[in-house]
Amino acid sequence: MDHIPVIDFAKIAQGTGNEQNWETISEEVRKACHGIGFMYILNHGIRKETIESAFEESKKFFQLPQSRKNDFPLDAANKYRGYTRSGQELLSPNSAFEFREGFAVVGINSPQKFPEELLTFKKALFDLEKECNVLTRTLLSLFGKALGLPDENHFLNANLGLTDASIANRVTLRTHWYPSINKDITIPSNSVRCGEHTDYGVCTLLFQDSMGGLEVRNSAGQWTPATPIADTVLVNLGDIMEIWTGGLFKATGHRVLIPEEEIRRRTPRQSIAYFVLLDDDCMITPLKSTKNYTFKENFESMSFAEFLDKRLGDTYQY
Ligand SMILES: O=C(O)CCC(=O)C(=O)O
Ligand SMILES: [Fe+2]
């Protein structure tokens, strides 16, 4: 499957779906995971107002003076919460410079500091975080069903911190701002908006504005645009899913280039990602077999905290 399928969750909305509907949707999810590793979800249950407000409030934050944004720096000591300036993060070792800013909220009830002149920004991110959390739990059940796991709650049990704040879990809502690139800016060669990478966790929920620009590497190695589709959330798999399933479900590479056309270069782009990870002390132990599959084991088991710290440490430039 080389295109990104659209999967309609209407039949299982708010937990009302019957068993047959769950089977049908989990089969569509299985095909997407087995294929391109990306899917658009329609009727996902996250309110349009919540998403719009998170975009509008993020824009207000990113339009603050640079010196004010720098008051909320992201660093390893505060668990990668807060603001990243352009160039601070290199998602691909091949990028010379990545033109994007970000602001991350980590964990449920994150103790993240926010600018007190923009408390609406805080509310908007927390509201979106809560609604993403609900959709995530549906997805985690569907992944278990799709793989035919003996315990369909396997993935939910690896993410108890999504509902229990006493369990360390660094689930991250991150809002991104790709600034306009004006003619007077010198762009080093090999610069991008977001370098090619795979996400680290189980899966990512992505909201993008209407600008487009995200590209996904399909199984033939070609770049396919992940064009924004109104009212959908784009979901992609991360490294943990690939490790767990011995490569059966793919963590697909993706990137955002600097647009060729002058008009699109000069227009900022926004996206918001909700990175679903694992509880910090969950051991990543590849699955051996399920009702449907037998997996190759190719990974020494380690705690998720250890895995994530290494991946994040490789990404940020100080
Ligand atoms: O901005 C986008 O569309 C993609 C962002 C992304 O892939 C990421 O932050 O991991
Ligand atoms: Fe990503």
Image: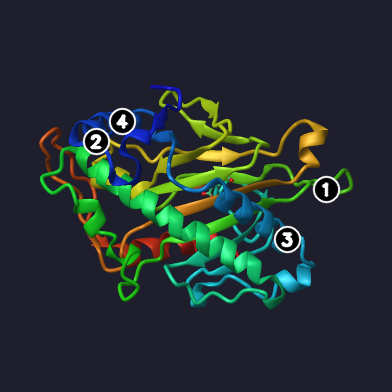
Q: Amino acid at mark 2?
A: Trp
Disc 3 designates what residue?
A: 60
* Extreme residue toward the right, this view: 184
Q: Is residue 149 above or below residue 8?
A: below
The residue indicated by pointer 4 is 34
Asked if residue 318 shows in the view, the reply is no
Q: Is residue 257 above or below residue 105?
A: above
* Element type at mark 2: helix
Q: Which comes before the other along the chain, label 2 or label 3?
A: 2
Q: Residue furthest front?
A: 16
Tell me, yes or no, whether the two marked residues, 2 and 1, touch with CB atoms within 8 Å. no
Of the pair 185 and 165, the residue shown nearer to us: 165
Residue 19, image quadrant:
top left
Q: Quadrant of the C terminus?
A: bottom right
Instruction: Give the residue pinned by disc 1.
Output: 186
What residue type is disc 3 on?
Lys
Instruction: State how far apart marks 4 and 2 are (Cα).
Output: 18 Å
Do callouts 3 and 4 mark residues in contact (Cβ within 8 Å)?
A: no
4 or 2: tag closer to the N-terminus? 2
Is the N terminus in the top left, top right, bottom left or bottom right quadrant? top left
- Tell me the residue that label 2 is attached to: 22
User: At 31% from the left edge and 76% from the top edge, which residue is drawn?
Assistant: 166
Q: Dot 2, crowdedness within 10 Å: few (<14), some or many (≥20)? A: many
Mark nearer the viewer, 2 or 3: 2
Residue 240 in the image: state x and y as whole percent: 32, 50
